[in-house]
């Protein structure tokens, strides 16, 4: 006679344990490899997570073009682009560690939850070993945290908020793009030289994380040179007509309007401000001025002639004449017929930097890549000598101050570089108050 | 006081756009009984009519300027618009400069045609269906139209400025005795308000003083009786759909110098315009216009720094708050009639 050990309680326990095991995402449980998505079969897959739909789709399309170009160059195709000017000679156009580079793409929609979902899918289903891209700090912070948990490297795209490498920094995340603090530090001396140190500034700020850190940075740097901040007003991210926010500016006694806006917000608020004739007014005996801390050429196109003469900052511009920039503009321009944007540049560079770090480390293991990138000094990628600082995984390099061009030669010729602010002037301590509150933690190999 | 006058002025142009869109929505609802969620897309298509005409007027031939180089170092390709060749540099430049007002003539037939095709091709099949079905199909249509525009024009806003004669602003405050720079108002927004007033007046006059309008009004009141008189009311209602589309389109054409248009601009206005219709009273044309201006002005007031300091976030909810209060006190809206959407 056989006796069954099956009991109701036992079945429940076993079922619960099995269910819990199945419920845990595979990225946290797949222990068969030494690290998450270890490449096999002679190929390695990178995940390009960019806005393909939504308001930043054009910027996302430009990022994707740059990634495709980077993959082509890494696999030995095309003219090699910046591989020919990069100070590191580890990459030889033979893929990464002999593995042919392949890629998958995801659509962030410029929404944090959608971006996390697409990144997760690329990691779990497509085997992406590195995630990169994006056009928003909210997305960058969200995806960076996911990559940290999953044990893959995150090379952020366009993200300008201090928090990405400040309170929300992660050991597996790296940012090549500059940040709000650097914009403030670079802009302030140029504003002082052009507009003087006795000014009253009125800030309109997009009501989300990037807006806050940019406002804080610009207020801090302009007040340090003697400007007075008359008012700071938050505007809803969904706002399309800014007339009711701009109309009270002149009544406040301000003689400078700072637009801490990006994308469609920037296009509309700047257009509205110019419509209201702010730049034609004399206030406090001075010409009224407008400042846009973060410029994007793609977005500046939307504002048309309204950008003329307006100062801002940018991470990179196609008109730079260093060898790296010229090589990139040539590769990109010949392939696509127009010059690359700053978003395209930072994405292309991030891909090369990741590939180079793997090559130098001799391994795709995330912690080895982190070690190779930390305190890595390089040149030849369009921004001059650059340091990937170990303490916060932020790149330190010269920052460009630009101005809307008065007499553009073409539809791409919208901004002119007025100052290349030296890196020393935009460098800050890792524990600077604008970046405090977070910790890198330890790198995660996943596996 | 100056701040109050300023926000009333600001509310007028925003209210003009709301009123024009809501007027078209109400015309369609009043005649055909359809809740048209694609109406915002018609506003957006109107705006892109202006963009298209501007691009057509800027159609150019290319010459090579050997003395200059492009971003790749090749000889610069110089684009010269054909209109400058045909009409001379000055007249050609003036035509391009006036592309937005000219787009009114361009947009009217296009928008009427789009409206008629939309009604005959899709919406007429949903007359007998519940309002929920109508909302779903028209909302789906709006997304399709939006994606088509994005495919051809991209996602970024496209600058389409007003004629040079209307750029800048005038000091309204000084006209009424205030100090300089206290109440400034852009010329083009004043043009927009005046244009909206003319269009609204024309629609009301058309309905009030023409035989066609009289029949349409009769059909709105009692469709069956009008049909029994042997009048093809359906054909007239289809034409009214086209006119409503043209009104939304014209609102879009003239709006492009205020904010550079993008594919999403219709959605930004659609929800607010529906609130305007409901607040004004479903089916009431004067209600739609009145509520449009009322909510536009209230929205401007809610964006004042002094108001936000006292009630943070009020600028984002004011319209919905007012809608709740009005619907609680007057369930049919400000000028709503008994029996509309109450079966």
Image (spheres, rainbow, N blue to C red):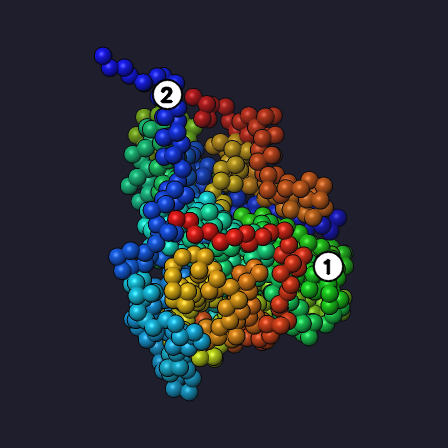
Chain for disc number 2: A
- Left or right of A234, for residue A363: left
In front: A289, or A215?
Answer: A215
**Mark 1 and mark 2: Cα distance apart in space:** 69 Å
Residue shown at 37%/45% (left/top)?
A31
The tag earlier along the polypeptide, 1 or 2, is: 2
Q: Where is residue B307 in the image (x, y as percent from the top left)?
A: 70, 43
Camera-side residue of A218 and B342: A218
- Which of pointers 1 and 2 indicates the residue nearer the eye? 2
Q: Are discs 1 and 2 both within one chain?
A: yes
Q: Which mark is residue A196?
A: none
Q: B112 or A251, which is in the foreground?
A: A251
Q: In this view, does A134 lie above or below B287?
A: below
Q: How crowded is mark 1: few (under 14 residues within 10 Å), some or many (20 or more)?
A: some
Where, by quadrant of the figure, is residue A222 drawn? Answer: bottom right
| Chain on which label 1 sits | A
- The residue wearing badge 1 is A229
Instruction: Please name whichever residue, B311 or A167, is drawn nearer the observer in this view of the structure.
Output: A167
Q: Position of residue B268 (x, y in %)?
A: 49, 46
Residue beneath disc 2:
A10
**Residue at x-position 57% and y-position 28%:** B327
**x and y percent of residue B42 in the render?**
41, 47
Which residue does the image show at 60% across and 65% down from the upper left?
A: A183
Residue farthest along the left direction in this orientation = A1
Q: Dividing the image into 4 quarters, which one contains the N terminus of chain A?
A: top left
The residue depicted at 57 percent of the width and 45 percent of the height is: B15
- SS for callout 2: helix
């Amino acid at each position: 006679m056989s006796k069954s050990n099956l009991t109701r309680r036992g079945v429940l326990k076993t079922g619960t344990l099995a269910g819990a095991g199945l419920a845990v995402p595979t990225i946290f449980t797949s222990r068969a490899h030494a690290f998450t998505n270890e490449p096999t079969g002679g190929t390695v897959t990178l995940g390009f997570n960019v806005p393909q739909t939504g308001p930043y789709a054009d910027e996302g399309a430009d990022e994707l073009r740059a990634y495709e170009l980077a993959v082509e160059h890494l696999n030995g195709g095309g003219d090699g682009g910046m591989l020919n000017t990069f100070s590191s000679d580890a990459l030889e156009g033979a893929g990464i560690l002999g593995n042919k580079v392949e890629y998958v793409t995801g659509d962030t929609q410029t929404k944090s939850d959608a971006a996390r979902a697409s990144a997760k899918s690329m990691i779990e289903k497509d085997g992406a070993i590195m995630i990169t891209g994006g056009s928003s700090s909210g997305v960058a912070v969200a995806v960076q945290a996911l990559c940290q948990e999953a044990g893959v490297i995150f090379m952020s795209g366009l993200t300008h908020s201090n928090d990405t490498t400040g309170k929300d920094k992660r050991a597996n995340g790296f940012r090549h793009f500059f940040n709000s603090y650097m914009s403030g530090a670079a802009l302030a001396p140029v504003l002082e030289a052009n507009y003087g140190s006795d000014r009253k500034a009125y800030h309109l700020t997009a009501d989300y994380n990037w807006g806050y850190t940019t406002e804080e940075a610009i207020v801090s740097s302009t007040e340090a040179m003697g400007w007075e901040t008359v008012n700071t007003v938050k505007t809803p991210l969904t706002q399309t007509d800014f007339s009711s926010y701009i109309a009270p500016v002149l009544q406040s006694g301000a003689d400078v309007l700072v637009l801490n806006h990006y994308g469609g917000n920037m296009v509309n608020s700047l257009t509205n401000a110019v419509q209201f004739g702010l730049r034609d007014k004399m206030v406090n005996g001075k010409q009224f001025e407008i400042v846009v801390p973060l410029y994007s050429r793609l977005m500046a196109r939307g504002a048309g002639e309204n950008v003329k003469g307006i100062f801002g900052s940018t991470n990179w511009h196609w008109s730079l004449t260093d060898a790296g920039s010229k090589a990139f503009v040539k590769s990109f321009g010949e392939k696509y017929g127009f010059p690359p944007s700053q978003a395209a540049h930072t994405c292309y560079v991030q891909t090369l930097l990741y590939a180079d770090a793997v090559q130098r480390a001799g391994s795709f293991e995330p912690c080895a890549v982190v070690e190779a990138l930390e305190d890595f000094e390089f040149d030849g990628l369009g921004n001059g000598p650059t340091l990937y600082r170990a303490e916060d995984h932020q790149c330190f390099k010269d920052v460009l101050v630009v101005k809307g061009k008065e007499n553009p030669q073409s539809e791409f010729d919208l901004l002119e570089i007025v100052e290349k602010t030296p890196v020393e002037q935009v460098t800050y301590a890792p524990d600077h108050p604008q970046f405090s509150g977070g910790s890198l933690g330890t790198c995660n190999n996943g596996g | 006081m100056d701040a109050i006058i300023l926000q009333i002025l600001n509310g007028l142009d925003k209210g003009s756009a709301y009123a024009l869109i809501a007027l078209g929505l109400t015309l369609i609802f009043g005649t055909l009984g359809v809740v048209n969620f694609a109406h915002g897309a018609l506003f957006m298509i109107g705006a892109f009519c202006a963009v298209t005409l501007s691009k057509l007027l800027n159609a150019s031939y290319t010459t090579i300027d050997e003395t200059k180089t492009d971003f790749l170092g090749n000889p610069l390709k110089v684009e010269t618009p054909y209109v400058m060749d045909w009409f001379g540099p000055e007249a050609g430049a003036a035509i391009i400069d006036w592309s937005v007002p000219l787009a009114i003539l361009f947009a009217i037939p296009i928008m009427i045609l789009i409206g008629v095709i939309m009604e005959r091709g899709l919406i007429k099949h949903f007359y007998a269906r519940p309002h929920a079905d109508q909302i779903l199909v028209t909302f789906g249509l709006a997304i399709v139209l939006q994606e088509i525009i994005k495919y051809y024009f991209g996602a970024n806003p496209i600058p389409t400025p007003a004629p040079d004669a209307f750029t800048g602003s005038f000091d309204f405050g000084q006209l009424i005795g205030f100090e300089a720079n206290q109440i400034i108002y852009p010329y083009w927004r004043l043009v927009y308000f005046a244009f909206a007033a003319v269009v609204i007046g024309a629609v009301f006059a058309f309905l009030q003083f023409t035989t066609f309008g009289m029949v349409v009004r009769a059909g709105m009141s009692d469709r069956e009786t009008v049909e029994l008189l042997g009048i093809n009311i359906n054909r007239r209602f289809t034409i009214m759909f086209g006119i409503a589309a043209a009104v939304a389109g014209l609102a879009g054409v003239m709006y492009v110098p205020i904010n550079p248009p993008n594919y999403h601009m219709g959605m930004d206005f659609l929800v607010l315009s529906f609130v305007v219709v409901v607040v004004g009273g479903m089916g009431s044309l004067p209600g739609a216009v009145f509520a449009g201006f009322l909510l536009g002005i209230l929205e401007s007031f809610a964006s004042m720094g002094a108001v936000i300091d006292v009630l943070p976030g009020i600028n984002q909810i004011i319209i919905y708050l007012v809608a709740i209060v009005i619907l609680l006190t007057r369930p049919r809206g400000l000028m709503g009639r008994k029996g509309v959407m109450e079966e």
